[in-house]
Amino acid sequence: QVQLVESGGGLVQTGGSLRLSCAASGRTFSQYTVGWSRQAPGKEREFVAQVRWSDSNTYYADSVKGRFTVSRDNAKNTVYLQMNSLKSEDTAVYYCRVGSYWGQGTQVTVSS
């Protein structure tokens, strides 16, 4: 079992930045692919970014490429999402994922 605690969401103006954190406890963190998805109101949950456990390669949705950076700190059992140049369309609940486990979600609101 893996428990996930997310933090860092909030309200930010267009063009601003936020950093989300997701701390994991329970199982060996380094053996999991970790990442983030998001769900906007009235829409399905969509992939945002991930870091593969085997080689730490990163993958991004086209909509966030060049603006968001996903990273992991295995010593701290934490995955991060640095979000820059935020747009109103980035407004959503952001969920971290460690293997098949999901966090509770953190709200990100970008105001114009």
Image: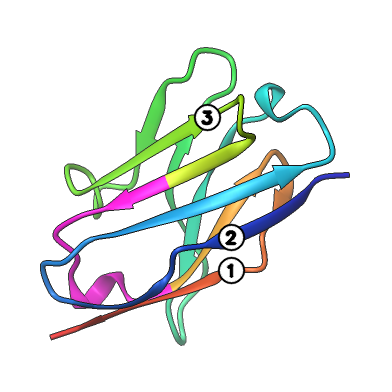
Going by the numbered disc 3, the residue's amino acid type is: Asp
Q: Which residue is mark 2?
A: 6
| Above-or-below relation of 6 to 36 | below
Q: Residues within 10 Å of mark 1 (few under 14, many from 20)?
A: many
86 inside magenta stretch: yes
Q: Residue at x 14, y 59 (%)?
A: 85
Going by the numbered disc 1, the residue's amino acid type is: Gly
Q: Residue at x 22, y 61 (%)?
A: 17
User: In the image, 4: left or right of 52?
Assistant: right
SS for dot 1? loop
Asked if the residue at tag 2 contacts the one at tag 1, i.e. Cβ–Cβ closer than 8 Å, the answer is: yes
Going by the numbered disc 2, the residue's amino acid type is: Glu
Q: Which residue is mark 1?
A: 105
Q: How far across and how far down the image is residue 87, in percent? A: 18, 70
Asked if the residue at tag 3 contacts the one at tag 2, i.e. Cβ–Cβ closer than 8 Å, the answer is: no
Q: Nearer the viewer, mark 1 or mark 2?
A: 2
SS for dot 3? strand
95 inside magenta stretch: no
